[in-house]
Image: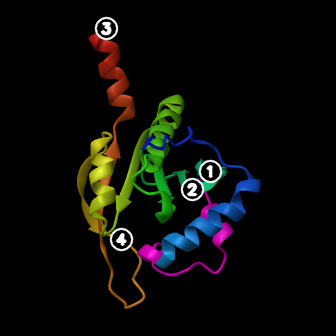
Amino acid sequence: MTPVVPPAPRRRTDDDLPACVAVLRAVHDTDRYPSTWPADPVAFLSPPGLVTALVVTAGGRGAGHAALLTDDHEPRALRLTRVFVDPAVRRAGHARALLDGITAELAARGRDGVLDVVESVPAERLYRSVGWLRTGTAPAGWRFPDGREPVATLYRLPVTQRRKGDDAAR
């Protein structure tokens, strides 16, 4: 069997939003992400502070999404959020392709990446495998539908430090 090679991620356009909402619905139904379905899923995918969003496709249709936001608490970093891949195409490299695209976006902007992960061991393994470093834990700042406040694991992708280190090694 020939392995599926996901296309390179590209910047999301407004035309991509219906497919992104459909994939988000499939992810919600499978994984409960987001934990509560948003009243306006398009607004959920385009939150305040959006810098850019990337999509990846499979078979000509939307298969994954990732976004970068400004972060008031981390002015020299951008926050990775709204990362998801269609359950029907998982384990075929789409998430890794999105993260590679995000790394390129961060490097182009000269910013580190920050993110928080709640209760997702597979996602955490993937983030660590592409260079994200665990920096701690903190209350997530929101609640599950059952009222519990989850603990978020915090990560940083030190793109600017990596670049400085790479330059020094030359």
Q: Are marks 3 and 4 in contact (CB under 8 Å)?
A: no
What label does residue 109 carry, if any? none
Along the viewing direction, whichever of 38 and 100 lies nearer the viewer: 100
Q: What element carries label 2?
A: strand
Q: Which residue is drawn at 48% across and 57% down?
A: 89
**Image quadrant containing the N terminus:** top left
Kindly report which numbered mark, 4 or 2, lies closer to the viewer in this rendering. Answer: 2
Q: Name the residue under label 2.
A: 63
Residue lying farthest top?
A: 170
Q: Which amino acid does label 3 sit on?
A: Arg
What label does residue 140 carry, if any? 4
Q: Earlier in the sequence, mark 1 or mark 4?
A: 1
Q: Which of marks 3 and 1 is nearer the N terminus?
A: 1
Magenta highlight range: 30-52
Q: Are marks 1 and 4 in contact (CB under 8 Å)?
A: no
Give the CA separation, mark 2 to mark 3. Answer: 38 Å
Give the CA separation, mark 1 to mark 4. Answer: 35 Å
Give the CA separation, mark 3 to mark 4. Answer: 40 Å
Residue 75 in view (yes/no) = no
Residue 157 image position (x, y, % from top left)? 35, 41
Q: In the image, is residue 100 above or below residue 116?
A: above
Q: Earlier in the sequence, mark 3 or mark 4?
A: 4
Q: Residue at x 29, y 21 (%)?
A: 165
Q: Mark 3 points at which residue?
A: 170
